[in-house]
Amino acid sequence: MSKIILIIDGKEVEANEGMTILQAAQSVGIVIPTLCHHELLEPYGGCRLCTVEAEVRGRTKLVAACLYPVEKDLIVRTKSQQVDKIRKMILELLLAHAPDSRELQDLAKEYGADKNRFGKEPSFCIHCGLCVRYCAEVTKKNAICFIDKGTTREISFIPEIAAKECWNCKECFSLCPTEALQAAFVLAQALAFPAPTE
Amino acid sequence: MPRINSAAELEELRKSILAQKDPDKPCIAICAGASCLGLGNDKVISAFEEELRKQSLEAKVDIRATGCHGFCEKGPSVVIYPEEICYLQVTPADVPEIIAQTVIGKKVIDRLIYTDPNTGAKVAQQSEIPFYKNQTRLLIGNSPKINPKNIDDYLAMGGYAALAKALFEMSPQEVLGEIKLANLRGRGGGGFPAGSKWETARNAPGEEKYVIVNAHEGEPGAFMDRALFTGNPHLVLEGLIIGAYTIGSGQGFIYTRHDTPVLRENIDLALAQAKEYGLLGDNILGSGFDFNVEVHLDVGIFVSGESSALMRSIEGKAPEPRPKYIRTSVSGVWDRPTNLNNVETWANVPQIINQGSQWYSSIGTERSKGTKLISLSGNICNSGVVEVPMGTSLKDIVYDFGGGIPNGKQLKAVHFGGPMGGSIPASLIDNPLDFDVLTKLGASLGAGDMLVLDEDICMVDLARFFLEFLSGESCGKCVPCREGIRQMLKILTNISTGKGKEGDIELLEDLAEVVSEAALCSLGRSVAKPLLSMLKYFRDEFEAHIKEKRCPALYCTRS
């Protein structure tokens, strides 16, 4: 596999062809924040928190580090005024849904994000898709999926599958950056196995 | 149908089709475009069929249901050939009279022809009606003259000659050279040079390559692609086959809507008939080139017209866009090189091959060549589909072709590109129709849908409307698009209902900036465009709503 030299935050980094900016940065200890990324899963590019500046042949673009493949002469800036502004707003948009998430609160502190900038709409889920993708790619059960589209998109357990698979698995629970997943599971459970009425 | 095995056999077939056609035989061409059908032209078609049967005229008079003629405002429209007499707003009750007076008696029925609303002058011939007269109808002009369900009509018009020329007289490299020299730019919204795209796919490594017709046309207010494709499916198909030959693709896809059954029917018939003649399938025209086409229907969401989402949909997955850091021309459907163009882009290809790049590039402006189909709607006298050369001034489109604004109202703005486009105020409509000029003005041409807005339209409400549309049509995968739309819509709803507050405009601008920079796909990066153009040209309207709790257009009654 051929080696590619690129520059991340002024530092020369050697990467393998096919690696993403995020992988190259992580290999030398440069931290790029992520929410929807997990090393066991295919890159997703949903949260956009890993947005960085990528300069190729004099042209700078804002790209998702978890997806952008490294290339020769690439110059990456993982922090800039523009990048920080984007990350701050992404966090503010998500805090409107999950204001108590520890992970979001820690990132909010770092980027100066105001959790009250947008009106509260506590749906808890931030649509990182970790549970959905883990269930599809790692356990291969597809017990949870996204339903609907646009602003009404949400996660939902499929009761028929969840009833058989989830009780002894629950591996996705620890991946959830908010409490949405467990709430959704409890709901699915309630619907699939209603408590016997007296 | 005989299979055709060479260019010479194609010309023989063409001659035999023409020999069977009597140019003096009366023909009734009834528009069966989406608008005319909606206005009841299916009943007019049945009335003509019945009347001809009753009078035993079936053998003496031809009848054909055609694609959209363009003048939707005055539909249902019927044209009687060979005199080309055009009757507008026809009802089934008019049918016996038309047959007796015009088809047999060769007389014009005054009350059914076009009357100029200003001068009162009457015009009988379709091509003399002011709406049609000054158009340059290179793409859609044949639609009234052919039955889209019969390939022979297309062949009679010289159809598939460009394919034969490309296959037998030109190398793929030469065809590519012509498309590049013609400077054909994508009609779907991006305006990207088609030649460069083809070249990337052609040079990309891989045996299997795909070509796609994007016939999704999901923008509210866009209806030119379905008009052209329904009315003349072989024109698009011929362009696609030439593209496949150039790129080295053996498999094509037509991606279209699940809710346009007439279009689907015409495409299926076109594919079957082209295959029977040997214009599609194995060993096309005996050239040794093999190419097949499959039709794929959408799942009813706007974002599935976005190219990478469309390709995932063809793969059988949910239509969620993927980032195009590796271009789809290199890695598209099933990670193979895939060239996607819009309906109108493909339809331009045959004429470029037939008449040459030099001829083609003589039409239009320096960097925007050829003609453009425009679907005119909104507050305009003549809604419909118009085809004009690039470079035509927006003012001419509104006033000459569109006939101006109805009800004595003033023009306020024209809006291009629907929910991903932008508005241009009336003060700037001397500008030409041109990809780059419109982009500079903050309103990309989009697919060519031009929504005309009069003084009673509230821009705050229009911005809100587009975001409301998008809130259900985005896929919802990435945060900036899903959450940005949610918040922008919330703020605009507040402003239009009198609950706007100081700082709202600045917050909208911040949101618009982040969404435009950080969203995953081209849809997400464009969702704030209408709002930004309206803030640029109509900021005072937003301010009036917020500061004075007043809607200057008197539309938002609750504010």
Image (cartoon, coloured by chain):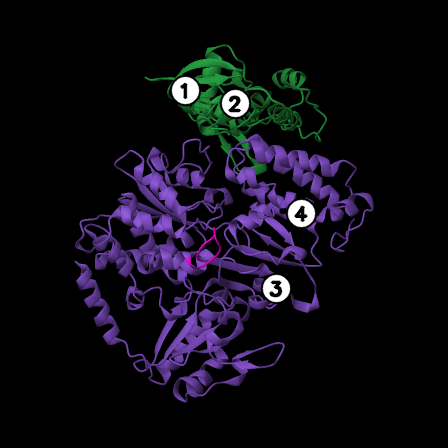
Chain colours: A green, B purple
State yes or no: discs 4 and 2 in contact (Cβ < 8 Å): no
Residue type (three-letter) at the residue carrying disc 2:
Cys
State yes or no: discs 1 and 4 in contact (Cβ < 8 Å): no
Report how far apart the C-alphas of labels 2 and 3 lie in the structure.
47 Å
Name the chain under label 1.
A
Packing grade of label 3 (10 A; few <14, some 14-19, many >=20) is many
Disc number placed over residue B21 in the picture, else none: none
Report how far apart the C-alphas of labels 1 and 2 lie in the structure.
18 Å
Q: Is residue B353 magenta?
A: no
In screen coordinates, is A116 left or right of A78? Answer: right
Report how far apart the C-alphas of labels 3 and 4 lie in the structure.
20 Å
Same-chain status of marks 2 and 3: no
Label 1: which residue?
A: A19
Name the chain under label 3.
B
Packing grade of label 2 (10 A; few <14, some 14-19, many >=20) is many
Residues in magenta, as a range: B362-370
The answer to whether residue B482 of the structure is visible from this angle is no
State yes or no: discs 3 and 4 in contact (Cβ < 8 Å): no
Label 4: which residue?
A: B534
Same-chain status of marks 1 and 2: yes
Image: B185 above or below B519: below
Residue type (three-letter) at the residue carrying disc 1:
Met
Disc number placed over residue A36 in the picture, else none: 2
Same-chain status of marks 1 and 4: no
Label 3: which residue?
A: B380
